[in-house]
Image (cartoon, rainbow, N blue to C red):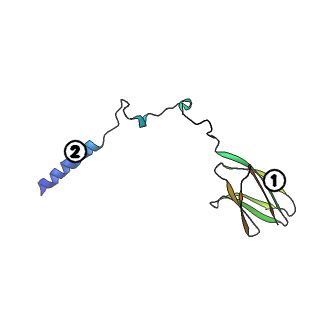
Amino acid sequence: MRKIIVVLLILGIGMGFVLCQKPKPNGEDPQTELSKDINELDVDDNFKWKTIKDIQVSLTSSTDEVAFIKSEKGDVILKVFLKGGQMFDTKITVPTYITEVNLVCKGQSNKLSVVNNRLTFDFK
C-alpha cells in the first residue's frame, strides 16, 4: 500500500513539473508580445474613441412633479423637479451605448429613443 502511495506521489510531482512550464522567452509565443506604443495600434479609421456623449434634455409638465430619467437597466440618470408650465432644459452626460431611456413622471413610464442627442418630452 505504501509503495502505491509513493508511486502516485512521484507521478503527481512529475506531472506537475511537466505541465507547469513558463512561456519561452525567445518570442515563440506571439500572444505575450504587447506593444506599449499607442501609435503601433491597428485601428479602423471609423472607430470612435469617445465613450461618453452629451444629451440635451427638455422636459415640461402641466403640474409640479418630480421626474426621473432612467437607463434601460433602471439606473437613475437624472432626477428633477418640474415646475408646472415651465420648461426644464439641461445637458446630461451618458455613456455612448445608451440609445434609449425611460422617462418616469406622474406614475407613467415612457420609453424614448435618444435622437440626435436630444430628449424632448411633455408630461401632460
* Few, some or many residues within 10 Å of mark 2 (<14, 14–19, 20+): few
Q: Quadrant of residue 103?
A: bottom right
SS for tag 1? strand
For the point 41% across and 34% down, which residue is it? Answer: 30
For the point 79% across and 61% down, which residue is it? Answer: 81
Residue sitting farthest toward the bottom: 107
| Residue 1 sits above or below residue 22 on the image | below
Left or right: where 124 falls relative to 28: right
Nearer to us in this view, 71 or 45: 45
* Few, some or many residues within 10 Å of mark 1 (<14, 14–19, 20+): few
Residue 118, how many percent across, how many down?
Answer: 76, 51
Please, what is the three-letter code of the amino acid marked with disc 1?
Asp
Left or right: where 115 falls relative to 28: right
Task: Check disc 2 and report the residue beneath it.
Answer: 14
Please, what is the three-letter code of the amino acid marked with disc 2?
Gly
SS for tag 2? helix
How far is disc 1 from disc 2 in space, using C-alphas?
71 Å
Residue sitting farthest toward the right: 85
Residue 49, how many percent across, how many down?
Answer: 62, 40
Left or right: where 74 falls relative to 27: right
- Quadrant for the C terminus in the image: bottom right
Residue 29, how many percent across, how many down?
Answer: 38, 35
Q: Which mark is residue 89?
A: 1
- Quadrant for the N terminus in the image: bottom left
